[in-house]
Amino acid sequence: MTSDFALPVLAAAQLLLALAMAFAFCRLLRGPRAHDRVLALDTLYVNAMLLILSFGIVWASRDFFEVALVIGAFGFVSTAAAAKFLLRSEVIE
Amino acid sequence: MTTLAAVLVLAGALLAFVGSLGLLRMKTFFERVHPPTMGTTLGTALVLAGSMLYFTALESRPVLHEILIGVFMTLTTPVTYILLGRAALRRDRNDPTA
């Protein structure tokens, strides 16, 4: 089904997404303050979700869609909780 | 059709890559908030469009459930960034030297 041209293009896209995750992880380690690290974690989650979606296309499996949806939900909840903690020093008031 | 889907995914991955590079290279926090939104908006939209196109071609019927992720990201990303921006403003006001 997949044409000969599609697989190298998808491999290049996956390489770019992996590099994007590496850059976000660098900022997660370096970030001078806590809110820089939370922002980097959010970017890391989004890039991981896109990488999982591209793996679903490469392996022609629709099961990866649920994984990507769950990763996106976890990313939102964890980042929102961390930002709320930085804002108020407690998550649930 | 699969070639077009792969090109869409590549374009979205390129946007996410440029966004993360900007996150790494910008100088202050309020500059760094901007670049990742490239990946979360148009990058995600392009990858999801590629995925929808690919599975529609693969199964010969419309496969549109990727829209769920798009709606979810569109709703949640601004909430996160508003909370982060307010947290950064408050922390800078309480501790301007850091």
Image: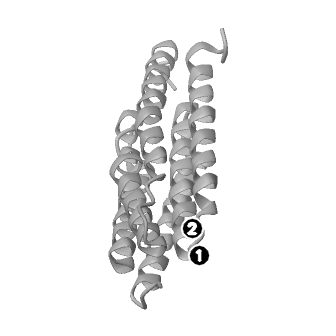
Q: Quadrant of residue B79?
A: top left
Query: Foreground residue, B64 or B78?
Result: B64
Q: Secondary structure at mark 2?
A: helix
C-alpha separation, residue under disc 1 versus residue under disc 2: 5 Å
* In the displayed structure image, the side of residue A39 where residue B15 appears, left or right: left
Q: Which mark is residue A56?
A: 2
Q: Contact (CB < 8 A) between labels 1 and 2?
A: yes
Q: Up-down: is B23 above or below A50?
A: above
Which residue lies at the image location 48% right of the left edge and 15% below the top edge?
B90
Let me know if residue B60 appears in the view. Answer: yes
Residue visible at 58% across and 48% down?
A: A69
Amino acid type of disc 1? Trp
The reply, left or right, for residue A60 in relation to residue B27 is: right
Residue B77 image label: none
> Crowdedness of circle 2 by 10 Å Cα count: few (<14), some, many (20+)?
some
Residue B98, percent across and down?
Answer: 52, 26
Q: Residue at x 62, y 26 (%)?
A: A81
Q: Quick one: SS at disc 1?
A: loop
User: B38 or B31: nearer the eye?
Assistant: B38
Give, as a three-letter code, the residue at label 2. Answer: Gly
Q: Which residue is mark 1?
A: A59
Residue B93 vs residue B2, the one in the foreground = B2
